[in-house]
Amino acid sequence: MSTCAPTPPTAANATPPLLDVRGLYKTYALPRGQKLKAVDGISLSVTHGEVLGLVGESGCGKSTLGRCLLRLTDVSAGQILFNGQDITKLPERALRPLRPHMQMVFQDSYASLNPRRRITDLLAEPLRVHPTATGQKRSSSAITARLHELMERVGLPLSALERYPHEFSGGQRQRINIARALALSPKLIVADEPVSALDVSVQAQIINLFADLQAQLGLTYVFVAHDLAVIRQISTRVAVMYLGAIMELGQTDTVLHNPAHPYTLALTQAVPQPVIGAIRPPPLRGDIPSPVSRPAGCRFHTRCPIAQPLCRAEEPALRQISTHRAVACHFPLA
Amino acid sequence: MRADMPHTSTQPLLVVQNLSVHVPAQGQLISLVENVSFTVGAQEIVGLVGESGSGKSVTAMALMGLLDSPGVRITGSARFKGQELVGMPPRLLRRLRGRDIAMIFQDPMTAFTPVYTIGWQIEEQIRAHTSLSRKQAQQRAITLLAEMGVPDPAQMAQRYPHQLSGGLRQRAMIAMALSCNPSLLIADEPTTALDVTVQAQILELVRGLRSSHGSSVLFITHDMGVVAQTCDSTLVLYSGRIAETGPTADLFAHPSHPYTAALLASIPPITGPRPAHLPTIASAPPTPHTRPVGCAFAPRCTYAHTPCTTSQPALVPISAQHAAACVLPTEGTPLPPRLGTVQTAQAHSAPHQTGTTPL
């Protein structure tokens, strides 16, 4: 087993984590009194400068969780602390000064850019809306200088500023979205499936860009993706989600190379690899149950190859199994 | 029409030669697919792989006679069991489609009509192409759903498409496609909309169709991992042209077109060392309007030199069935074999490390 580089404990203890989530719930009311628990009691923290990957299949709540973290969706219960400050119930007005520090990049690069505005206008808007750290309005020359700097950071020519979103390819548009997210020098970026709509050859460019920016600017990411290989490439820590809850949490290399949860193992085995002679039988049978009627006991027991009677009766809590690792399984593999 | 020509098992099921598709745009004819040739043998799974805009779906649509936009020009030849599909009158083509050649699509939600039950839609197809009675067709639909691994098939046949999960809908669509025992199944990104654990099940199902139904499959995908796990031979398309073609094992072990090699290298690895930087291909593929003279990949190719920009490279043989449209092999400087092709036992133990490992 690989020993992962531990997160520096001194730094983590001295300052509060950038993001601290405690017992978070997000429930949607459906017709006929049904409830959909999209996020079902999640606790996790993200330290300064780390990349936390959220991975799971559709309906696992990874995108909802990402949106809750930035208060783009109101939470049903629980607490979100951003930089030590409780933002769970902050009204919009009080949240606005914090917005420059938390930004988002979305999956659909086209839908997230107003098609009728030039790139220069799209990127300048956050700079016009938000004053500087000292509370001053930015001058137009300062904004222009910042736009030029941003274009260089994301690898686009300055001429791109005068063009419209439809004139760019998907990869270039995602660069523009990243530039806009960076405009106000945020501390945290939540990226929701930012590369899943891109072709492989372009996907690699954007993953590299995310990694470079993180190293250069000391950014913190919460990176949401369904693709395990993408998550492995970008994130330092990973949370594997299933039907609204975290199944396993730990250092990326430890979790993916030596999974403790049967679901994590199944995910790693299900990814079709571009190598010959590695055809394996499908690790799981059946489909993901509907989050509206999630199974009692362990939520994974209906598909779990090693389920025991206990798993049907009692839900396992997410418990620490080593310093930087937690798993929600009665019978962990590691 | 040469429908009388007997089909013998010695000749491939489908022989496509120099298939080209042109559409009028901005006052000129632009080519979406150029001189694509390949064969699909009996019980063979052939992968058609490429990025968006590479022409893989257009190729399939052209074969099925589904391109009917005004001014579209399809040239070349596609012989299915000896019958020429290009230029076949719609009346004859309709008889072939669904019965001898069936197609499954990426999005089963839009491929089914939402207002009829799954069972009704499968029955309709059976009754359109065979002389079975309603009762018999009903029974056959349920049998097919069961064969596709749908639990409680009699119940499921009564459901509407929106009541099924994505995986079940895809199984139902494959059941419908197989309802008349087609000899050729064209699958256009059948697993792209599915989750990985469900995708693995559908891929196993498709691999099994060869022995269970004797089907040949033309498998369209953008995912090199899916190709490696499913296809016997592979065709890599780039900008509407064949970049490389060959048995999947040869192509993955020794990619001979720089595009294939770069595409494989740019996939983030799931095991082994994690590169600090993923190898990338610069910029993006050309559109059919901006396709350069010479090799379409030349502007993005690290090996590009003068001959690449002057004339379009011919498909040159690498080994018996393996060929690449690149000048490098003819110039005596072929690409090196790809490393890490076969999974090794120690692949799982490598810790996170930096340093790029070119494949």
Image: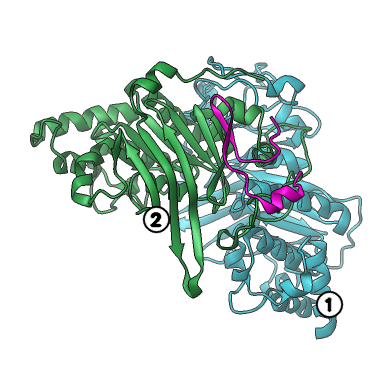
**Which amino acid, by three-letter code, is at mark 1?**
Gln
Chain given the colour green: A
Instruction: Locate residue B226, reporting x and y percent.
Output: 68, 42
Task: Indicate the quadrant where residue A249 lies.
Answer: top right
Task: Tell me which amino acid carries mark 2.
Answer: Ser
In the picture, which quadrant includes the C terminus of chain B? top right
Circle 1: element type: helix
The answer to whether the residue labelled 1 contacts the one labelled 2, judged by CB atoms less than 8 Å apart, is: no
- Where disc 2 sits, the SS reads loop
Q: Residue at x 86, y 59 (%)?
A: B213
Q: Chain of mark 2?
A: A
Name the quarter where the N terminus of chain B is drawn: bottom right
Q: Is residue A19 left or right of residue A185?
A: right
Q: Nearer the viewer, residue B271 or A316?
A: A316
Q: CA distance from mark 1 to mark 2?
A: 48 Å
Q: Report which residue position mark 1 lands on.
A: B139
Mark sitting on residue A76: 2
